[in-house]
Image: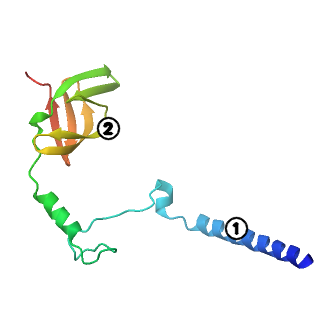
Amino acid sequence: MNTSKTFTTLLTLALAALAIGTMAAAADNKPATAATGIRSVFVLPSSTKEGRDPFFPESTRVADALAQAAATKPVDITTLTVRGISGTPGHLLAIINNHTFAVGEEADMQTSSGRTHVRCVEIHTDSVLVEINGQMRRLGFDTQ
């Protein structure tokens, strides 16, 4: 019994020392990402020379998808129209094609050229500034 108790005490002390040492090392050498909450950053390579898929190194699907995305035609936004703007002056809401947006909200919407990602940037009393595939566009009311 005495040997078991001694072993348990030594193990507890060793774990406590390890924890204190780890906390001291972390306090002295905090990574920049700890403050921002960023855990991982993944960057897609633009070609196979910049990097490969580690699980499928012979695959070219990432580079092919990026090349296809770069070659896509511009989005036809004529099907996106502002149906209404409401809310208080400090918190306006815009209805675009029966979808309600506040500033900063995002949604995938159907256009004549397919589904596209729309992010609401600004809402004014007569128009809405949106970001569509990285391009800023101003949408007005439907004139019908």
- Looking at the image, which residue sits at the far right? 2
- Quarter holding residue 101: top left
Residue at the spot x=10%, y=58% of the render? 71
Mark 2 or mark 1, earlier in chain: 1
Q: Are dots 2 and 1 in contact, CB under 8 Å? A: no
Above or below — where is 138 with respect to 126? Answer: below
Q: Please state if 74 lies on the left or on the right of 52 as rendered.
A: left
Query: Whole-Å distance between the Cαs marked 2 and 1?
Result: 44 Å
Q: Which residue is mark 1?
A: 20
Q: Which mark is residue 129?
A: none
Above or below — where is 53 with respect to 113? Answer: below
Q: Nearer the viewer, residue 86 or 83?
A: 83
Q: Which residue is mark 2?
A: 105
Q: Amino acid at mark 2?
A: Glu
- Quarter holding residue 64: bottom left
Residue at the spot x=88%, y=79% of the render? 3
Q: Amino acid at mark 1?
A: Ile
